[in-house]
Amino acid sequence: MSQAILAADRIVKRFAGHTAVDRLSLTVPRGVIYGLLGPNGAGKTTTIRMIMNVIVPDEGTVRLFDAPGTARDFSARIGFLPEERGLYPKMRVLDVLLFLAETRGVDRRSARVKALQWLERLGLSDWRMRKVSDLSKGMQQKVQFISTVLHEPDLVILDEPFSGLDPVNAQVIRDTILDWARTGRTVLFSTHIMEHAEQICDHVCIIARGQKRVDGTLAEVKREHGGRHLSVAFDGANGGAAQVFADRRLVAKVEDFGQYAELELTPTADAQEILKALVASGARLAKFELVAPSLHKIFIDLVGADAARPDARPEVARA
Amino acid sequence: MRKVLAIIRREFIERVRTKWFWVGTILGPLLMVGLIGFQILLAGRRGGDRRIVVVDGTTTAFGQHLVRQLQTNVPRFHLARVPTRAGVADSLLTEVVGKQLDGFLLVSDSTIDFGTAEYRGSNVSSIADMEELQGTLRRLVFAARLERRGIDTLLVRQAEIPLRLATHKISGTKLTGESGEQSFMVGFGMAILLFVAILIYGVNVMSSVLEEKTTRVVELLISSLRPFQLMVGKVLGAGAVGLVQLTVWVGSARLLSGAKYRVAGATAGAGFTFPNIPTTTLLVFVLYFLLGYFLYAAIYAAVGAMSSTESEARQAQVPVQLLLMIPYVSFFALLNDPNSSLAVWMTMIPFWSPIATPVRWGATPIPVVQMVASIGFLVVAVLVVTWLAARIYRVGILMTGKRPNLKEMVRWIRAG
C-alpha cells in the first residue's frame, strides 16, 4: 500500500455508552478525491478527528504519508477544515489567515502573498482588513476554506465543506476542490449529501453507525451495489405493464408512477425479456433505458434503515 | 520554536491593538500624577487665613506670649487679644456667626495649672488648625510650668523647640534616603500593582483560552501545535503585554520618584515627595511579578480550559482570585511587622509570595536564605503548576458541556 497517502487501520473510538467508530479501516490513494459518506451521527467527524489526532483512537492506527508520525507532525502538509468552523471574531481577515498559516509553518511573507491571491480569487479582497465578525457566515466559510489550503498541503481534509453554503458559494468551493485535485493533491471530505459526492468523488466510503458499509471507486460501488436499474416511460398506453412489473423472476423492486416507472432487475433477469413482454402486452414505450443507480439510491439502500433509527444506543456485544 | 512565536505574537498584537490596553497604560501614570496633584492640593488647602481672638484671662503674660508665639508659628493666623470681661464670649460669638471671626480661644491661669483651655469657632473640624493651636498651647504651657519652678528661661526656650522624628529605613548595612512614610507608599503601591497586574493578565489568558474554545479555533490549532505549546505561547504573549504595561507604569513612577513637588506660594514646608524607589526593589518587583504571573496564568489557563462559557469561567476563577487576595489583604500586617512569622510564611508559600515578598522587601531587609528559599519554592511551584495545568488544559480545551468536578480533573491529569 505504498500508494496510500492515508491509511486508517481498524480504528475504534468509544464514548460513554456507545461506540462512535467501530474498527473502521480506510485507505486513501494519492491524488484522489475521497468521499467519506454517512448519515448524521455515523462517525464521520469522529473519524476525521482521529485522523487529525485531535482525539486519539482507543484502538487501531492511523498512518499518514506512509511514514510514522501523527497529523501534527505533518501539519505543514495537511489542510484541515473542522466540522465546527471557527475563526477569531475580533481579528482582521488577513491577520487570521497569516496567523493560521504561521501555525502550519509558513513564513509570514509568503503567506501574505498567497493569502491575497486567494482572497482575490474568492472575491474577498475588499474584506481583507475587516474584522471576521463583520463578515457573513458564507464569507467566513470561504475565509476558513482559504486557511485550509493556504499552505498548499498535499492532503486536504474537509469535514462537511458545503454545509451552510448557498449554491453559488458551494459551486465555488466545489470548483476549487476539483482544481486542487487536478494538481495531484489528495482531498478527503465528508458529507451526507450524496449529490455533492457523486459530482466530484473518485472514491467513496459509506459508513453507518461507525462501521464501514462499502468503499471503493465510485464506479465499483455503483456496479457492485447498485444492481441493474431500468427506467421506463410510456407514450399514452401502458397496456399490461403492471403484470410485467409484478413478475418477481424479472423485477426485484418497482416504483410505478403510471406513465413512468423505475425498476430494479433481479440478478438473473435480462432486460430484453422485459422489453419483449412489455411490447407483447400492448404498451407503447416512449423510453426504455438501462441506468446506473444514483449514489443517493445506493446510500439509502445501504444505510436508510440505520439512519432512521436513533444512533445513540447501548454498547452491544461485538461479534 | 516558530509556531510558539506565532502564538505569542498573535496574543501580543491583538491585545495591544485593543483600546483597553491604551486606556490602561496611560491611565496608570495619569493616576500617579493625579495622586501628586491631589496631595499638593491638600497641602495648599491648609494655608487658609484665620482670624482668631485670644480671650486672655491670665494674670501673667501668658496670653501675650501665646499670641506672639502663634503669630510666628502660623503666619496665616491673624490674632488679636482681648482681656476677659463679662459678655465678651457672647459678643465674639455673634462675630463668629457673622463670619467676621473664625473663632476664639479662651485661656486662663487654670490653663497652666490644669491644662484646660477652650476654643470656640467655625473651623473646629479643621484638623490642621486645631493641631496648630493645641501644639503651640501645649509647648507654652510646658514652658510656663517649668519657668514657674524657676528654671532658666533660656533653657526653657530651648526646651520649647519641638521635636521632629525623622524616620529613615535601614536596608542592609546602609541608611537609605527612604522615610517610613515613603516605604509604606512603595509597599502599598507594589501590593496594588502586583495584585491588579497578576489578576488582569491571568484573566486575559483565561478569556483567550475560552475564546478559542468557544469559537472552536482550538481544534484547528491543536492539529498543528501541541496543547502545551499553545498554552505556553498564550501565557508568554499575554505576559509580554503585562510587562510592557508595567514598564510604562513603573517607569513613570521612577521618573516621578524622589522628586519634590512644591506648591507655588505654599506657606509652610508644604511639599510632596514622591517615594524614592531603589533599583533593587524594582528588580525584586519585576522578578516576583513574572514568577507570580506565570504561576497564576497557568492556573487561569486551566480554569479557562475546563469552562465552556464566560460566566462559568468567571465563577470558576473565584477561588483563584481569593487565593491571590490573601497576601494582598495581609498587606498592613506585613508592613507593621515585616519579620513576624506570618510575614516569613507568606514569603515562603508560592501562591502568596509574589505579592508578600516585594511588600516585605520594601519594609525590611529580608535574610538572603529566606529570599533564596522564597524564589526557589516559587520557581518549583511554577514548574509543577504549569505541568498540571497543561494536562488539564489538554483535555479541557476539546471538552464541551458540563464543567468537570475534582475527580474528573484528577483523571484528566492522570490520563496519558
Image: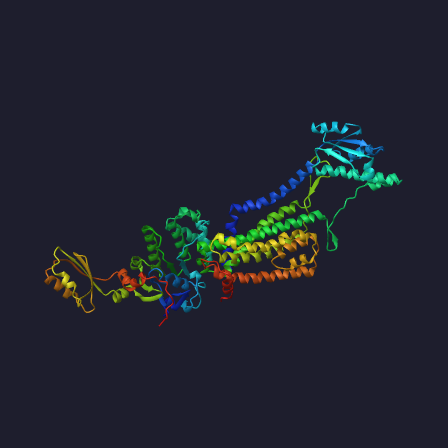
Q: Does residue A247 sit above or below A95 in this rendering? A: below
A182 or B330: nearer the viewer: B330
Residue A306 image position (x, y, % from top left): 31, 63
Where in the figure is residue B402, as x and y percent of width and height?
46, 58
Locate residue A217 relative to residue B41 in the image: left or right: left
Image-based side of B380 in relation to A73, left or right:
right
Residue B120 rendering spot, x and y as whole percentages: 73, 33
Viewer-proximal residue among B61 and B70: B61
Quick one: B301 or A17, which is closer to the camera? A17
Q: Quarter-wise, where is residue A249 in the image?
A: bottom left
Where residue A92 appears, as percent x and y from the top left, is: 45, 49
Asked which colour scheme the image uses, the reply is: rainbow
Relative depth, front residue between A84 and A303: A303
Where is A118 relative to B412, above or below? above
B197 sits left or right of B411 in the view: right
Numbered marks: total: 0
Q: Which residue is found at the position 77% from the left and 39% from the top?
A: B135
Visible residue check, residue B9:
no
The answer to whether residue A251 is visible is yes
